[in-house]
């Protein structure tokens, strides 16, 4: 999974983790660097050179920031679901939101594993 795909997965959040914009900027900066030849000639590199140019540590850090934000979002949904005043429709909505958030987190965890695997030479 590309860093851009991981950034696209995250939704707006009111967490204390890095903001979505900051994470997208980090991932975008690394992706732009990966597509440029040395000397910034503007020519597109072939795919074989991408792994040498993307900083996997920055990508991993950004992915963990996304995971943190989504865990905090899941926490909000879980706390909301604890309300005694919640009707059945709102409870189902909380369940759906938690499941969706956990699916996104699983994708981001997979992306971290792939990043580590690529960094170790596959």
Image (cartoon, rainbow, N blue to C red):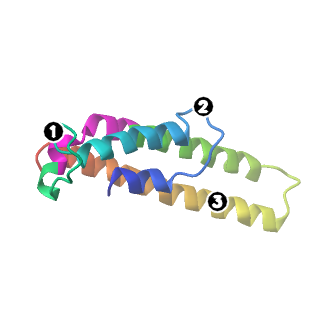
Mark closer to the observer (2, 1): 1
Q: Is residue 15 magenta?
A: no
User: Tag 3, which secondary structure?
Assistant: helix
Drawn side of residue 55 relative to residue 46, left or right: right
Category of crowding for the residue at label 3, using alpha-carbon neighbours closer than 10 angstroms: few (below 14), some (14–19), many (at least 20) = some
| Magenta extent | 50-61
Q: Position of residue 80 (x, y in %)?
A: 76, 49
Mark closer to the observer (3, 1): 1
Q: Nearer the viewer, residue 116 or 77?
A: 116
Q: Label 3 to label 2, Cα distance in Å?
A: 19 Å
Residue lying at the far top of the rendered structure: 16
Q: Position of residue 45 (x, y in %)?
A: 17, 53
Residue 98 bears which disc, if any?
Answer: none
Q: Nearer the viewer, residue 49 or 111?
A: 49
x 38%, y 43%: residue = 27
User: Which residue is the site of mark 2?
Assistant: 16
């Amino acid at each position: 999974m590309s860093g851009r795909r991981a950034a696209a997965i995250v939704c707006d959040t009111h967490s204390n983790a890095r903001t979505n914009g900051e994470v997208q900027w980090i991932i975008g900066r690394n992706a732009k660097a990966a597509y440029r030849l040395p000397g910034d000639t503007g020519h597109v590199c072939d795919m074989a050179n991408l792994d040498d140019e993307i900083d996997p540590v920055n990508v991993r850090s950004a992915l963990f920031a996304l995971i943190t934000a989504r865990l905090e979002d899941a926490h909000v949904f879980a706390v909301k679901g604890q309300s005694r005043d919640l009707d059945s429709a709102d409870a189902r909505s909380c369940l759906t939101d938690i499941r969706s958030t956990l699916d996104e987190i699983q994708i981001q965890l997979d992306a971290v594993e792939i990043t580590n695997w690529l960094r170790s030479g596959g």
